[in-house]
Amino acid sequence: MSRPAFLLRPEPGWSASASTARAIGLGIEGEPLARVEPVSWEAPARSFDGLLIGSANVFRHGGPGLAALRDLPVHCVGETTAEAARAAGFTVETVGRGGLAPVVASLAGRNLDLLRLCGEARVALDVPAGIAVTDVIVYRVTHLPIPSALAQQMRVGGVVVLHSAELAGHFASECDRLGLDRSSLEPVLIGPRLVPMIGTGWRAIHIAERPEDAALLALAAQVCSKAG
């Protein structure tokens, strides 16, 4: 018997992932446990060699201030972010796979002054010699409590699809707050960096082979199809 899969990421990602999941026969439950909001920001009044971008939310919520930066090449975390950059009129120079740290590492040997547009919660970067990174926050993610109806669904167990470390940590905290049995739930994670945030005590933890939505959902479908 197939187990339920719970999707918790914020919109518009929730709807996009749900559509992809249904196309491969994966039934989806759940709802967004976070919302993304713009914050007021200004770029430093100096020139940069490029933009370092770790989320498509920068282009969704960055607002009119982005227009002044469109001449800068973009070094971004993955293809979804690259697509959002191109749709916003930017030229993408680097597309990573597996997080923002490898993107920065790939630029080693160059002298670059980069502007990182980012959210309030962001990954600390180990920056190679010759590269400078200035952070400017353009959005925040506000996490939401698990509603009682969703908590009731989760009490019977299932698979939980998690796209970010911040959401993984929030979900784990909510399970503890609500007294949900970790041993009945199986987190499916988009990458290994989520493991410290999700913690222990789960029925099993699964990590996608590639840090991509399609790979994550394909793995979730495999886990769900196993006998309960």
Image (cartoon, rainbow, N blue to C red):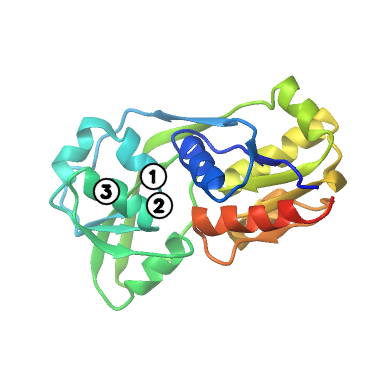
Q: CA distance from mark 1 to mark 2?
A: 7 Å
Query: Mark 2 — residue?
Result: 54
| Along the line of sight, the residue nearer the viewer: 194 or 153 | 153
- When asked about the image quadrant of residue 132, the answer is bottom left
Q: Residues within 10 Å of mark 2 (few under 14, many from 20)?
A: many
Mark 1 and mark 2 in contact? Answer it, CB < 8 Å: yes
| Along the line of sight, the residue nearer the viewer: 199 or 8 | 8
The amino acid marked with disc number 2 is: Gly
Q: Is residue 1 visible?
A: yes
Query: Mark 3 — residue?
Result: 85
Tag of residue 118: 1
**In the structure shown, which secondary structural element does the residue marked by tag 3 occupy?**
helix
Tell me if residue 108 comes above or below residue 210 in the rendering: below
**In the structure shown, which secondary structural element does the residue marked by tag 1 occupy?**
strand
Q: CA distance from mark 1 to mark 3?
A: 13 Å
The amino acid marked with disc number 1 is: Cys
Q: Residues within 10 Å of mark 1 (few under 14, many from 20)?
A: many
Please report whichever mark, 1 or 2, sits nearer to the chain's N-terminal start.
2
Looking at the image, residue 89 sits to the left or right of residue 100; the answer is left
- Which residue sits furthest top? 148
Q: Residue 86: where, in percent of width, then height? A: 23, 50
